Amino acid sequence: MNLRHDQPRQGVAVRVARNGDDLLACQRLRHLCFFGTAGLDADAHDERCTHLMIERDGALLGTLRTLLVADGTGLSDTLTAASYDLSPLVHYPHPILEIGRFCIAPGALDSHVLRLALGALARMVDDHAIGLMMGCTSLPGADPARHAPALALLGRHHLGPADLRPGVRSAVTHPLSGPLSDRRGATAALPALLRSYLGLGGWVSDHAVVDHAMDTVHVFTCVEVARIPPARARALRQLAS
């Protein structure tokens, strides 16, 4: 894939990882962002994924990886399937793009990195006729009580269609329920990436998964391409063009 978007004034570009050194750079940044220390965040899925790199003058600002699933029978090969029962999506009629390991370097401007990443994803959506994008979005800290307002907000306003929502697979889950007294505050507590997906018409499943190894609570997140508001879709395609 020949993917490169340059922003001359900021010196920022997004491209596909080309070699082992690029992959190591992505894995180092992931470990720093997810665990707060130097190291490599690597797993068996890395070899099968396409890794995007957002850079400024050669410095890595952000990274994410994608896996193209040609049809629902390939969903069992995704990392998301380790946490959620994806059987409701097995007969989905269009290609699916799994998105994962999205992280932004400390000190980088989140909004600019997010815009470039979303523009790159829009290019992939058009190139491969993607019908939906999916993955897990993490909230830092493995205590669901810490995220109670945000989880209640998701359960009340952002649940996906019952016939498409994944079922329970993980041993430790938490329902998206509870009182919601401050919608604005709960929205602000959501990760910027999740707010971006929801702004595209995205939705979540009906439960969160508690991941003590990563020290996160994460939710299944899906964006159906056909449900993206037309104005947002045009803006993303302008970024991708």
Image (spheres, rainbow, N blue to C red):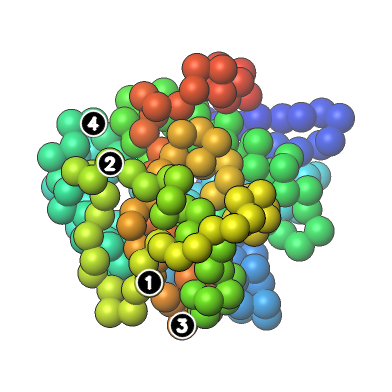
- Residue 20 in view of the camera: no
| Rendered view: 202 above or below 145 | above
Q: Amino acid at mark 3?
A: His
Identify the residue position indicated by label 1 in the image: 174
- From the image, state whether disc 2 or disc 3 is nearer to you: 2
Mark found first going from the N terminus, 2 or 4:
4
Identify the residue position indicated by label 3 in the image: 212
Q: Provide residue 145's location: percent of width, then percent of height.
A: 53, 76
Q: At 78% from the left edge and 48% from the top edge, which residue is drawn?
A: 109
Q: At 58% from the left edge and 46% from the top edge, which residue is drawn?
A: 195
Label 2: state its secondary structure.
Answer: loop
- From the image, state whether disc 1 or disc 3 is nearer to you: 1
Q: CA distance from mark 1 to mark 4?
A: 30 Å
Q: Provide residue 191's location: percent of width, then percent of height.
A: 61, 56
Identify the residue position indicated by label 4 in the image: 94
Q: Amino acid at mark 4?
A: His
Label 3: state its secondary structure.
Answer: loop
Callout 2 crowding tier (Cα within 10 Å): few <14, some 14–19, many ≥20: few
Q: Amino acid at mark 1?
A: His
Q: CA distance from mark 2 to mark 4?
A: 17 Å
Q: Provide residue 127's location: percent of width, then percent of height.
A: 40, 25
Callout 1 crowding tier (Cα within 10 Å): few <14, some 14–19, many ≥20: some
For residue 87, side relative to residue 208 (left or right): left
Q: How many marks?
A: 4
Mark found first going from the N terminus, 3 or 4:
4
Label 4: state its secondary structure.
Answer: loop
Q: Name the residue nearer the viewer: 110 or 197.
A: 197
Q: CA distance from mark 3 to mark 4?
A: 34 Å
> Mark on residue 161?
2
Q: CA distance from mark 1 to mark 3?
A: 13 Å
